Image (tube, rainbow, N blue to C red):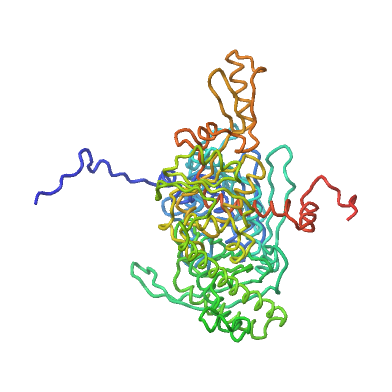
Amino acid sequence: MAATQPPSGYDASHIEVLEGLDAVRKRPGMYIGGTGSSGLHHLVWELIDNAVDEAAAGHANLIEVTIHRDGSVEVTDNGRGIPIGEKPDGRTALEVVFTELHAGGKFGSGAYGSSGGLHGVGASVVNALATKLTAEVDRDGATWRLDFAERRPGHVGPRGGFTPSSKLERVKKIPARRTGTRVRFWPDLDIFDPEARIDYGRVRDHVAEVCFLVPTLKVRLADKRGTNPPEPEEFSAKGGLADFVDYLTIGEPLCEIITIKGEGTFTEKVPVDGKLTETERTCEVDLALRWVKGYDSRIVSFVNTIPTAEGGTHVAGFERALTKAVNDTLLPGLRKLAALEKKGKGRAEKGDVQEGLVAALKVTLPEPQFRGQTKGELGTPGVQSIAYEITKDGMVAWFDGGGTKSHVSAVREKLAQAVINRVAARQTLDARRKAAKLGANGMPDKLADCRTHGIDAELLIVEGDSAAGPAKAGRNSENMAVLPLRGKVVNAGKANMKQVVENAEAQALFTAIGAGFGRDFNLDDARYGRIIILCDADVDGSHIRCLLLTLIYHYMRPLLTEGRVFAAQPPLYSVKVGDEVRYTFSDAERDALTAELAAAGRNTEKLNWVRFKGLGEMDVHELVETCLDPNNRILRRLTMEDAMEATRAADRFEVLMGSDVARRKAFLLENSELVDPAALDV
């Protein structure tokens, strides 16, 4: 058989080797997760985390973070200072840290027993994605400085000129005992998305978080941007993770904060002199948790000082141990579960145990193995069993008498009810599925279905019958189905499973899509390839969109992760210009079109602008042209980040528009800067 010929024009000359920091600039997403705002914040986290490592190792107790007017960010710590001695090639250690990937003091256990920065790319990645960077080190009785311009080391002169050099500048003499590091960088905005920006609130949350992880640490934060910048803030938390759980708690606590600590050892193979050698590691586990009366769960986890948003082996061990302790110690013999136990349904699942749970978990170990440079998930296998054993022993001790008796009873009652609600919800859904099979087509009576289903089919979710009429008349009935909502969609972020399944609008949506819900949801069974939310462009429409997105996020999440959920963008205004109808989607677009027409010589005072108060006011032709015709409509794909934001927004709507007057009153008093509380009769 003849050998396959290589593609034409492809030879050894096409193989590139990216040297130094070029690899970071070529593929920034590999190092910081993306080029949006999250990636920009990741650069700030890298510098903060380096300073926090100094504090966690006992060498620093103060970090200062400043966001300057010009968009640069400066991080200062009073730690030992980055080493300034020369390497064999004549470069200083300070230069190497900022110019070489995989260079640092955290690979072994000499400089740091445990740390957040372990890959040795953090500081150099910041330099790689900055137009300029300045590093100052207080050490050996002097302040030493090295500037970087376009990633090259050197010095900025008094008139702004840059001179390449590896030699450190001795700025001034200082007391011999004073040490520390100051790093200021200007991000290269050409690398990042146009809308990427550093958000003060996000930085504030991050620095507050690290204080909970290192109780001896104090962090000062200042934002100097804008005409009216916020006052500088200072953060510290001597109570550690217990304070963190208290800070995260929303709603009425059901029990006291439970704290559990312990350590264990595991072995793993690591390279030593080029050979894999078994090494014993020590892992410390620090855990704080409590239950609240609501249904939302909030679990935050950390490895050393790094947040692990995607969990990992430590979280898996904690979750498995908590469920085991509840089933083996807390719930056995409970009368209200007796009937379910006879049917083999009396044991709690992970979702039951985590209903209303607020927890903070931190593990500390040398050289943890992360999955990815952004360190979102811990991969070290040996940590799971240690986290499991320490969590299980601690929780069993609390359930068996270590906790306040009334608090243990309250948790037992809540988790037992969660089991009952889950079983009842599944029974309700099963009953509806059986009833559907016996019906004519098994679909909600208000669904105007399409003739063909599959990846090319669309389900349009609209508000009420007024919008449903034009949508049904204007759709392509071959592949477009219309489902009008006639009642309030349940807030799935606050309700339990039973309440969600019993909600008429949620039932209709589950049944129409036909893929189940929760853990039973199977994307392959979905009857439609796209779910399109078509709501009015007003506050009520935004509320309904938030509630729908929250429902999908909690109970049909694969639709979001696979990019199958969209929001149609209906116009706010229309105007007839000659024989053409023009549409605009905001006040700004209307004003821009008016200015454009005026510049073209048209008398804009005679323009008859029509403002759509809702989709029901559009005639069939207008709805088809702006929202239904695939060639003209504008659809925005909704992401997991949109869904999480919608969950928060749905809760805010509930506070401001719901029936809980006391909660709304407390929110307004806490957040209104225009009200003088002393002047109110409350």
* Image: 611 above or below 134: above
Front residue of 330 and 465: 465
Q: Give the answer, above or below, for where 580 lies relative to 36.
A: above
Q: Is residue 559 above or below residue 249?
A: above
- Residue 536 visible, this orientation: yes
**Residue 460 vs residue 584, the one in the foreground:** 460
Which residue does the image show at 46% across and 46% down from the upper left?
A: 458
- In percent of width and height, residue 151 lies at 48, 42
Rendering coords of residue 509 (x, y %): 53, 55
Image side of residue 563 versus residue 574, left or right: left
What residue occupies the far top of the structure in this picture? 601
Q: Give coordinates of residue 257: x percent, y percent.
A: 68, 73
Quarter residue 591 falls in: top right
| Quadrant assignment for the C terminus | bottom right
Q: Nearer the viewer, residue 329 or 185?
A: 329
In this rendering, does residue 20 appear at all?
A: no
Q: Nearer the viewer, residue 35 or 178?
A: 35
